[in-house]
Image (cartoon, grey):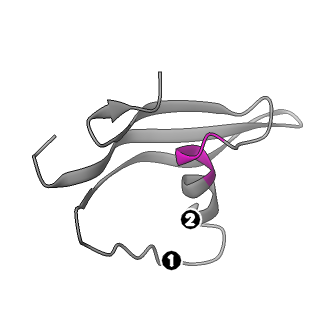
Amino acid sequence: MSTDSITRISGLSASNPAKGGTVTAMCDVSLELRRGAVLALVGKSGCGKTTLGLSILQLLPEGAEVGGEVGYDDCPLSE
């Protein structure tokens, strides 16, 4: 992570169990937020904005599968 980066997300993916299989909510999201910067997430309804936020905060419902890495201020948040 660069010295001015406060949050780094790399290859974040999430899927949820559904009847008859699994639904992929988002796939391979990567971004970096630098100190003092503002980041806006925009997109169509259902494109994964809320799932991204819940994944970062580790608040997805039980049974959801999450992969990838989330780091904040040089500390990993995901395992």
Residue 78 shown in magenta: no
* Amino acid on which the number 1 mark rests in the picture: Gly
What residue sits right under mark 1 in the picture? 43
For marks 1 and 2, the one nearer the N-term is 1
Furthest residue in direction right, as rendered: 19
The majority secondary structure of the magenta stretch comes to helix
What residue sits right under mark 2 in the picture? 49
Q: Quadrant of residue 4?
A: bottom left
Q: Is residue 56 above or below residue 74?
A: below
**Residue 42 appears left or right of 69:** right
**Residue 11 appears left or right of 48:** left
Q: Is residue 77 above or below residue 26?
A: above
Q: Residue at x 65, y 38 (%)?
A: 15
Secondary structure under badge 1? loop
Q: Of tags 1 and 2, which is closer to the observer?
A: 2
Q: Residue at x 48, y 45 (%)?
A: 27
Q: 4 or 32: nearer the eye?
A: 4
Q: Is residue 42 above or below residue 62?
A: below
Residues under numbered marks 1 and 2 in contact, where contact means CB atoms less than 8 Å apart: yes
> Magenta span covers which residues?
54-58
Instruction: Residue 14: give x, y in percent of width and height.
Output: 58, 40
Q: Quadrant of residue 34?
A: bottom left
Q: Quadrant of the N terminus?
A: top left
Instruction: Residue 73: give x, y in percent of width and height.
Output: 29, 43
Q: 24 or 50: nearer the eye?
A: 50
Instruction: Residue 22: give x, y in percent of width and height.
Output: 73, 35
Q: Quadrant of residue 33?
A: bottom left
